[in-house]
Amino acid sequence: MEKFTVLTGVAAPLPMINVDTDMIIPKQFLKTIKRTGLGKNLFDEMRYTTDGKEVADFVLNQPAWRTARILVAGANFGCGSSREHAPWAIADFGIRCVVAPSFADIFFNNCFKNGILPITLPQAEVDKLMDDAARGANAVVTVDLDKQEIRGPDGGVIRFEVDPFRKHCLLNGLDDIGLTLQRAEKIATFEEARKAGQPWL
């Protein structure tokens, strides 16, 4: 998993509450088990018309936010079904951080497992970042995970909280497999001892 240390990029505003996982990546795109290729269908039903043309006024179709790395959203982001394809699609598009007043629990957990930093902030601070994000290409925001700070385009700083273990995993690029591989030597030693002591297994 790619490490998350300091992220600087354009923030895109999505001032909608209750954005569910079917809105993030509709069900017809869940046939793959690959984590790549889903970015083009992120928010598919909001980004495209039924005949596949871009919806001009959707934020990620507008020139200023086409390469957004940060998403500022409304409350209860990622609600609905537990599909892990939702963070896959967000990451594949290039977004590595989502800021919102609240998240659905399963989506929130899945973000950390896929290299995305979800940040929960009070509504007033989200509103400030939403206002910053509305500036388009001038909405360059820096997220510093080690310092647990968001620095806005005007130099303002917002502090955020993150679970220490999850912070460690993101800073070091460790997903569940990576964490297991850190103990590969102990696992191998255990397996050798088990084979010697219980060869019939």
Image (cartoon, rainbow, N blue to C red):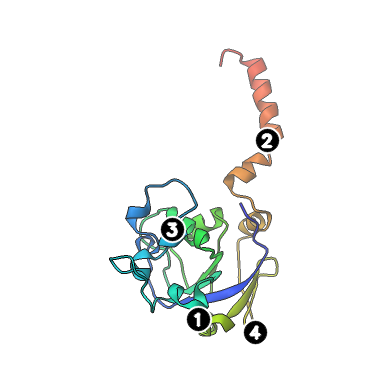
Q: Quadrant of residue 6?
A: bottom right
Q: Is residue 150 above or below residue 185?
A: below
The numbered mark at residue 156 is 4
User: Which of the marked residues, 2 or 1, is nearer the chain's N terminus?
Assistant: 1
The numbered mark at residue 184 is 2
Neighbour tally class for label 3: few under 14, some 14-19, many 20 plus, Cα within 10 Å: many
User: In the picture, which quadrant includes the C terminus?
Assistant: top right
Residue where numbered disc 1 is placed: 130
Q: CA distance from mark 3 to mark 4?
A: 31 Å
Q: CA distance from mark 2 to mark 4?
A: 44 Å
x then y, percent, for residue 176: 58, 46
x then y, percent, for residue 54: 37, 71
Q: Is residue 74 left or right of residue 115?
A: left
User: Which of the marked residues, 4 or 1, is nearer the chain's N terminus?
Assistant: 1
Q: CA distance from mark 4 to mark 1?
A: 14 Å
Q: Quadrant of residue 182?
A: top right
The numbered mark at residue 143 is none
Neighbour tally class for label 2: few under 14, some 14-19, many 20 plus, Cα within 10 Å: few
Q: Given the image, on which type of amino acid does mark 2 rest?
A: Ala
Q: Residue at x 43, y 67 (%)?
A: 77
Kind of element beneath mark 3: helix
Q: Given the image, on which type of amino acid does mark 1 rest?
A: Met
Numbered disc in front, either 3 or 2: 3
User: Which of the marked residues, 3 or 1, is nearer the chain's N terminus?
Assistant: 3
The numbered mark at residue 86 is 3
Q: Is residue 7 left or right of residue 92?
A: right
Q: Is residue 180 above or below residue 155?
A: above
Nearest to the observer: residue 119 or residue 52: 52
Neighbour tally class for label 4: few under 14, some 14-19, many 20 plus, Cα within 10 Å: few
Question: Does residue 30 appear in this view?
Answer: yes
